[in-house]
Amino acid sequence: MARLANQIVLVTGGGSGAGAATSKALFQEGAKVAIAGRNAKKLELVGKEIQSLAPTDFADRFMTIPGDITKPQEVDHIINVVKQKFGDITILVNNAGTNIKERRMREISIESWHQLIDTNLNGAFYCMRAVLPAMIAKKEGLIININSVSGKRAYPLAGAAYAASKFGMSALASCLAGEELENNIRVSSIYPGEIDTPILDARPNPVTEEHRSKILKPEDIAQAVLYIACLPARVSIPELIIKPTFQSYF
């Protein structure tokens, strides 16, 4: 029996990387899955891949919604579209994130700072805020934030602005979890180390194929999300750190 047959999931940043892999994993476990992102073509490509997995009930359990999570009105639109087709969201996966090449404090422009805060922190806040009323009303819900080890340790490699946005995301998740204990709303933060996703293209220095072969894959993050999502409602995992074996974590 599909473990997530009664769940309605929204995955942000679902057009590539960990978001795409997570969407496939949740769909295969029976969930109704909506993916959102700014690039409609990427979303459609993910949809075609998922359709090949289950062509019979694909249209009833999957949808794509182009939208920009940095804009509150577009987040509200995304939530409403999901509700109209599937019902209230029961699992939110905050996966959308970005980084920039100019990562040293001396290099970060005001515009770049706002870009990272708007996407990584504000976008997550808008999405959590939008799904919260329905979860409170039903006294159940799960929010999974794909954070970063940079939300635990301010590694210079990730950059000051990125780390600041991820530390803020961590604080936001912890506060929300504490506030909504009585309403049975679980908030989990996953802190991955390096992942072989398109965000690596924003590294100041190119990443070699040898290095890519040793780091996490999007499917690894998808399995972590799936593990949390499939646990019974009595179980909550506030934090999960996942990293490549060779990567240090102090």
Image (tube, grey):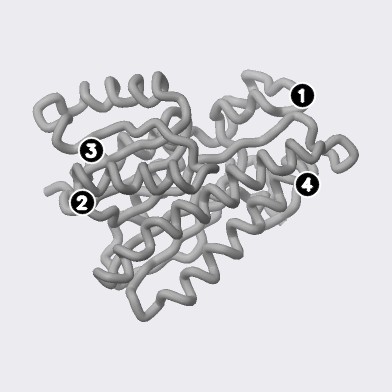
Q: Which of these two is toward me, 127 or 193? A: 127
Q: Amino acid at mark 1?
A: Asn
First along the sequence among labels 1 and 4: 4
Give the percent coordinates (x, y) of residue 164. Answer: 71, 52
Q: Circle 4: is it few (<14), some (14-19), or many (20+) Cα within 10 Å?
A: some
Left or right, 21 with reference to 47: right
The residue where tag 1 is placed is 205
First along the sequence among labels 1 and 2: 2
Marking on residue 87: 2
Q: Circle 1: is it few (<14), some (14-19), or many (20+) Cα within 10 Å?
A: few
Marking on residue 112: none
Which label lies toward us, 3 or 2?
A: 2
The residue where tag 3 is placed is 28
Q: Which of these two is toward me, 77 or 57? A: 77
Give the percent coordinates (x, y) of residue 57. Answer: 11, 32
Question: What residue is shown at x 56% (from left), y 63% (from top)?
Answer: 172
Residues marked 2 and 4 touching at CB (< 8 Å): no
Which type of secondary structure does the marked residue at label 3 adopt? helix
Cα–Cα gap, marks 3 and 2: 19 Å
Question: What residue is shown at x 66% (from left), y 57% (from top)?
Answer: 167
Image quadrant in which you'd find residue 110: top right
Question: Can you say whether 2 is above or below 235 in the image?
Answer: above
